Image (cartoon, helix red, strand yellow):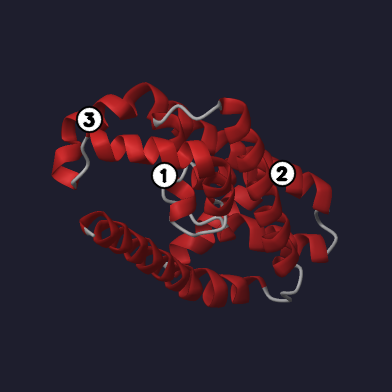
């Protein structure tokens, strides 16, 4: 697994800024691809003066926005009908879907923005806005803001590393799934809380 991640990172990084764009596009779409594979090595290369911060920031942010946009349009064109058809198997009916729509109407921008910082969730957070037909301009603005801050942070962390392989072995492989697990626990807690409130 670690060797595969390393090879993928080295290949795309050999493409320069365009490689960063591609990796972040993949990471933000429905294709499972860890963003750290792109951003931490890019930060490392900034530290060694082989890349520049602003082009990396632009490539990473635009790639993230492009991948998120793909998920948004897939959700908008395909998702709602499938949700209504198969949602009953996931305890989702029209009433609950209406509740989701109401939540995104009130807090959609915040959900989209914060979702860019959560591993795994970040890859799928763009489907609900598309399914629920969130305003595309609001979606793009808050997705871009969240993605830009995330890219800047991860690249900055990458500049602190002095050894490329150390990035792969310590951060990417070990800690990504811990954060994802904590995020899933939190989501599960919120769902249980909503169900209890509904029963009361």
Q: 10 Å neighbourhood of mark 2: few (<14), some, or many (≥20)? A: many
Percent of width and height locating residue 78: 33, 25
Viewer-side label of 1, 3: 3
Q: Is 60 displayed left or right of 1 in the figure?
A: right
Residue 44, quarter of picture: bottom right
Mark 3: secondary structure: helix
Circles 2 and 3: CB atoms closer than 8 Å: no
Residue 178, quarter of picture: bottom left
- Residue labelled with disc 2: 17
- Residue labelled with disc 3: 84
Tell me if residue 4 comes above or below residue 95 in the rendering. Answer: below
Tell me if residue 20 comes above or below residue 186 in the rendering. Answer: above
Mark 2: secondary structure: helix
Q: Is residue 49 visible?
A: yes
Q: Nearer the viewer, residue 10 or 166?
A: 166
Q: Nearer the viewer, residue 69 or 9?
A: 69
Tell me if residue 168 comes above or below residue 127 in the rendering. Answer: below
Residue at 35% over, 40% down: 99
3D distance between C-alphas at marks 1 and 3: 24 Å
- Pick whichever of labels 1 and 3 is earlier in the sequence: 1
Residue at 59% over, 48% down: 113
Residue 36, quarter of picture: bottom right
Tag of residue 31: 1
């Amino acid at each position: 697994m670690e060797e595969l991640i390393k090879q993928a990172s080295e290949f795309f990084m050999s493409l320069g800024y365009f490689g960063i764009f591609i990796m972040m596009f993949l990471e933000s779409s429905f294709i499972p691809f860890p963003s750290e594979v792109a951003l931490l090595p890019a930060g490392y290369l900034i530290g060694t003066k082989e890349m520049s911060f602003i082009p990396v920031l632009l490539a990473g942010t635009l790639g993230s926005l492009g991948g998120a946009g793909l998920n948004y349009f897939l959700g908008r064109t395909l998702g709602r009908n499938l949700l209504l058809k198969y949602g009953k198997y996931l305890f989702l009916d029209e009433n609950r879907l209406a509740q989701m729509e109401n939540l995104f109407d009130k807090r959609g921008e915040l959900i989209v923005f914060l979702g860019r910082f959560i591993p795994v969730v970040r890859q799928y957070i763009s489907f609900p806005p598309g399914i629920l037909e969130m305003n595309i301009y609001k979606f793009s603005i808050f997705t871009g803001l969240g993605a830009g801050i995330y890219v800047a942070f991860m690249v900055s962390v990458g500049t602190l590393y002095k050894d490329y392989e150390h990035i792969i072995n310590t951060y990417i492989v070990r800690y990504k799934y811990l954060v994802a697990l904590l995020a899933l626990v939190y989501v599960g807690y919120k769902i249980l809380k909503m169900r209890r409130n509904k029963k009361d």
